[in-house]
Image (cartoon, rainbow, N blue to C red):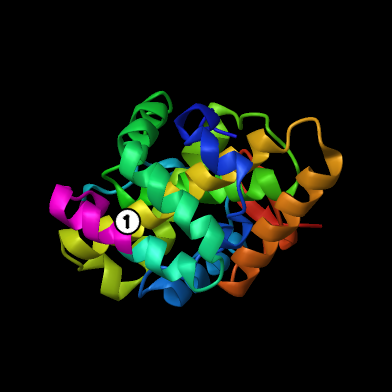
Amino acid sequence: GLALVAAAPPAIAQDGVLDATGMGVYALEETVMQAARETVSSDRRKASRVAPAPSRLAYTPSMERRRANLANFVAKSRKVDPRGAATLEKELAATDVIGRMNRALTGYGMRADNVADAYAAWWLNAWLASRQRSDDPTARQVAAVRAQAAEALMATPALAGAGDAVKQEMAEAHLVQAALISAHMEGARGDPALSRRVAAAVRQGALASGLDLGAMELTDDGFVPRR
């Protein structure tokens, strides 16, 4: 989804980092997931929902913080999947994953240095992967989910008033997760059994963080409750 397969480190798709497709890598995770869940159950047909992500959700990235964020991500992944974390650490050291993700996102009018865009990229990739889908959402769907993600994030007081460090940590966690999901889906191409395993891992990872991907549908108005 979102043409992000090209942004994902290829070796990750060939190794065992399925456990890393869950979240659990930043402090505000549960609060943000709850806010996102609430937007799914709200009225998604208001025109204001497709407004651009607020500039308050943008941040000025720091390479020093990025190195620390990626190291922390690997450390947390190591607790559940040491072998996969070792592969992930190697790939993150050899590849500018965030830079590649940013280049992929720009094709959709999105940016890696906006936490709402990063969250939307993860949300869309996770939902598509949970359905074993590799097609791209429409431009209208992307715009709606960007606005929906921004709505959820702005409803999280600790994030709405956060500084660059907190925003960068959350954005980069989601960007790496989106790249991992895309890499695994690409690695499972042509293997239905593996594709089902990836889909299940993505669903379980999101659910553990408080977001039930199976309970929502993607529409032109963003994510809405599944009927």
- Image height check: is 101 above or below 193? above
Image quarter (top left, top right, bottom left or bottom right) of the C terminus:
bottom right
Magenta run includes residue 38? no
Magenta run includes residue 57? yes
Number of residues whose C-alpha sits closer than 10 Å to that of mark 1, classed few (under 14), some (14–19) or many (20 or more): some
**Residue 45 at what x, y percent from top left?**
58, 48
Nearer to me, 199 or 35: 199
Q: Tag count in the figure?
A: 1
Give the main secondary structure, helix, strand or loop, of the magenta stretch: helix
**Residue 160 at what x, y percent from top left?**
26, 66
Q: Secondary structure at mark 1?
A: helix
Left or right side of 56 for 41 = right
Which portion, as a residue range, is magenta?
A: 56-71
Nearer to me, 45 or 192: 192
Image quarter (top left, top right, bottom left or bottom right) of the N terminus:
top right
What residue occupies the far right of the structure in this picture? Answer: 193
Q: Is residue 178 visible?
A: yes
**Residue 200 at what x, y percent from top left?**
75, 58
User: Which residue is at a point 44% across and 45% down the rendered structure image?
Assistant: 146
Nearer to me, 197 or 212: 197
User: Which residue is at a point 66% across and 36% down the rendered structure image?
Assistant: 187
Left or right side of 27 for 129 = right
Q: Is residue 117 visible?
A: no
User: Which residue is at a point 66% across and 55% down the rendered structure image?
Assistant: 224
When asked about the image quadrant of residue 26, the answer is bottom left
The residue wearing badge 1 is 70
**Residue 174 at what x, y percent from top left?**
43, 53
* Residue type, numbered disc 1: Leu
Nearer to me, 127 or 62: 62
